[in-house]
Image (tube, grey):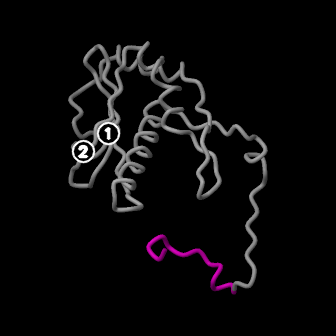
């Protein structure tokens, strides 16, 4: 079996590393949304906040964190690698999508991929520190659309 989920998998994982990863994930605290996106005016957790919430817990459980960039047949990515003192490692790739084709766009995409790769490996979601926003009902009001316009479109037509 050689698909995306098992690529590079050589056998049963080292139970010491798996237990250490579980302990690390259980020891994580929530990540605060500490930054504001100036374009959308929404809050998000910065890379610094994610690193602050995860690095000491990973390290105290025997993990080093690396986030190298690379390229494969699917594109350019940031790979988050958790290296355990037992020699076992866990990794996840986040592929980059550039909003601007310049160094600023590249830097933003790398930061975004590092943040979400690390959140995924830590099994964390940023905490909504404004409970009022989370508890508001969502309201979708559509005016002036015919019944034909309001039908759902397949994803391929977006």
Q: Which residue is found at the position 35% from the left and 35% from the top?
A: 80
- Front residue (pair 5, 136): 136
Q: Position of residue 73 (x, y in %)?
A: 21, 54
Tell me the SS state at disc 2.
strand
Write down the quadrant of residue 149 in the picture: bottom right
Quarter holding residue 126:
top right
| Residue at x 34%, y 59% (from the top left corner) | 102
The residue drawn where x is 59% and y is 24% is 29
**Is 69 displayed left or right of 123 in the figure?**
left
Q: Secondary structure at mark 1?
A: strand
Expressed as whole percent of the image width and height from the top left, the position of residue 90 reads 33, 29
Distance from Cα at disc 1 to Cα at disc 2: 7 Å
* Residue to which mark 1 is pinned: 79
Q: Are marks 1 and 2 in contact (CB under 8 Å)?
A: yes
Residue 86 higher or lower than 140, as above or below: above
> x and y percent of residue 53 in the render?
53, 26
Q: Is residue 14 magenta?
A: no
Does the magenta stretch mainly form a helix, a strand or a loop? loop
For disc 2, the marked residue is 70
**How many numbered marks are there?**
2
Indicate the quadrant where residue 91 lies: top left
In the rendered view, would you say 41 is above or below 55? Answer: below
Is 149 colored magenta in this rendering? yes
Q: Which residues are magenta?
A: 146-158
Mark 2 Cα within 10 Å, few/some/many (few <14, many 20+)? few
Question: 53 or 39: which is nearer to us?
Answer: 39
Looking at this view, is 105 or 130 the one in front? 105
Q: Could you tell whether 33 is left or right of 119 in the image?
A: right
């Amino acid at each position: 079996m050689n698909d995306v989920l098992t690529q590079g998998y050589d056998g049963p994982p080292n139970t010491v590393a798996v237990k250490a990863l579980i302990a690390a994930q259980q020891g994580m605290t929530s990540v605060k949304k500490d930054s504001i996106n100036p374009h959308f005016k929404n809050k998000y957790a910065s890379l610094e906040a994610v690193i602050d919430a995860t690095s000491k817990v990973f390290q105290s459980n025997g993990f080093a964190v690396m986030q190298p960039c690379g390229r494969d047949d699917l594109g350019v990515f940031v790979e988050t690698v958790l290296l355990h003192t037992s020699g076992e490692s866990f990794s996840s790739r986040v592929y980059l999508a550039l909003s601007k084709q310049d160094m600023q766009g590249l830097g933003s995409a790398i930061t975004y991929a590092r943040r979400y790769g690390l959140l995924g490996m830590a099994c964390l979601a940023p905490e909504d520190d404004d409970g009022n926003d989370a508890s508001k009902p969502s309201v979708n009001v559509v005016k002036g659309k015919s019944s034909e316009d309001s039908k759902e479109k397949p994803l391929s037509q977006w």
